[in-house]
Amino acid sequence: MGGRITLAVFVVATLLWMFTSVDDTFIALGAGLVLVVTGVLEVEVLFGSLGDPTIWLLIFSFVIAAGVSRSGLATRAGAFLVSGARTVRQLTHLTTAALVMTAFAIPATSGRAALALPIFLALARALGDRRRVILAMALIFPTVILLSAVATLIGAGAHLITAEMLAQTTGHRIDFVQWLVLGVPLAIVSSHLAAELVLMLTTRRADRREPVRITAESIGEATKTSVTGRMSEAQTRSATLLAVIVVLWCSEPLHGVSPAVVACVGALVTASPGLGTIRLKDSFSTVPWPMLLFMAATMAMGVALTTSGAAAWITDRLFGPGQGPALPAWLFLGVVIALSTAAHLVLQSRSARSSVLVPLVIAAASGTGVSPAAAAFASTAAAGFCQTLPSSAKPVALFHQVDGVTTYTPRHLLRVAAVLAPLSAGLVLLFSLMVWPYLGLPVR
């Protein structure tokens, strides 16, 4: 009975996410409440998910990111990289490298897009009337932001949902360090390939041959940030703190301190009088509380889907009762990756996609002999592609219209997506079969 109720709630919530304008968080909280009232889910599971270390890791990361942004450190680093470009291709890949680096400092793709927008405006002004190059840069910014999010556990809320669902249903937790080891190579390769593809599809050879001259001063002027000369005291403190935090996160196996605890210390230093760069009250205003509530509710829904037997029932109907046939790993993963890549066309929220797909993928993988961790990670990585339409993701919508001017049209996005979607999916499949097994994530 509990499985049927869970499945019904799950289906209704998914349909509401897909076809209504009702707030995603409202739907998720309502679904979680129904599961509690019907006795399918313990109240401690629903509300206890808010106290999960991964939720607090994200909260403290936003506080740290607010301090970094306030100091102007991220803008200064981006200006330093981009000002070294002498050709359009160099500008493209230096910009890509700078955007990939922001994944380690700014959680969530929408926050990174907001941070990068002034830099794009500065580049657009410096490029003048080179319309096709500006179009390429407008497409590259959101594309790289979305694809490079896979680099870190805090790159998107969907990552935390996946990690927590895996831990609660299989006992296998992909921690910060392992996610870094698996995600960084894919983030770098996919981002630079995508940037090169966009450049080739939107510019001509003559555009790419014409030299460019972007100065740090021009970016600093446009962003009203100190990007030249010696770093300010605030920037020095932010750089030091950020370096220490990242080192401690990466060395967790050596000292055993939870990433959430490290982030808590970093957040306190960021907001402390004298040492900090922002007041705690101001930093908390940058935390997307609705997204955190959404994550907590959907994690609880995912647990209910598995523990109630609903996910196993779906798997049995797809593959037969008990252990399903041992499908070739490449075929199973190929189907999972294809569905995850296309899911953004019906579910705009990245977190909602993981909430819907990951429990089913975990159950299906268990029934076909494929590692649930490998399948869930591949699904989450593939779901990072979501730039087919302006409404597909917040960064795409943000760069679609800048200062009231349309930078690219849906036709431009569709043209790029037609080539980039299969390339991105193929790359995730390649990593799943030939790279990640050597980095500690076997397929079976």
Image: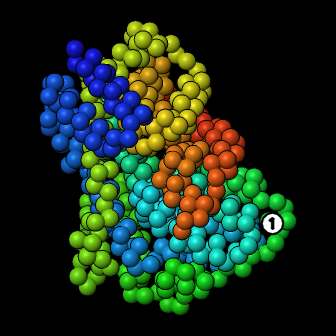
On screen, residue 333 versus residue 292, left or right, reads right
Image coordinates of residue 338 in percent, x first then y, are 58, 32
Residue at the top extreme, as displayed: 321
Which residue is located at x 48 percent, y 73 percent? 74
Closer to the camera in the image, 96 or 388 = 388
Establish if 182 lies above or below 44: below
Residue under label 1: 207
Closer to the camera in the image, 100 or 205 = 205
Image coordinates of residue 31 in percent, x first then y, are 25, 33
Q: Where is residue 95, by image quadrant? A: bottom right
Q: In the rendered structure, which amino acid carries the disc numbered 1?
A: Asp
Establish if 230 lies above or below 169: below
Q: SS at mark 1? A: helix
Q: Is residue 72 visible?
A: yes
Which residue is located at x 63 percent, y 48 percent? 410
The quadrant of the rendering that contains the N terminus is top left
Label 1: how many Cα within 10 Å (few below 14, some 14–19, many 20+): some
Q: Where is residue 15, by image quadrant? A: top left
On screen, residue 256 versus residue 88, left or right, reads left
Q: How many marks?
A: 1
Establish if 364 lies above or below 380: above
Residue at the right extreme, as displayed: 206
Which residue is located at x 23 percent, y 43 percent? 49
Closer to the camera in the image, 311 or 332 = 311
On screen, residue 237 versus residue 33, left or right, reads right
Image coordinates of residue 113 in percent, x first then y, are 49, 62
Residue at the bottom extreme, as displayed: 229
Closer to the camera in the image, 330 or 207 = 207
Q: Where is residue 34, by image quadrant? A: top left
Image coordinates of residue 127 in percent, x first then y, are 70, 74
Q: How are the colours assigned in the image? A: rainbow
On screen, residue 169 versus residue 403, left or right, reads left
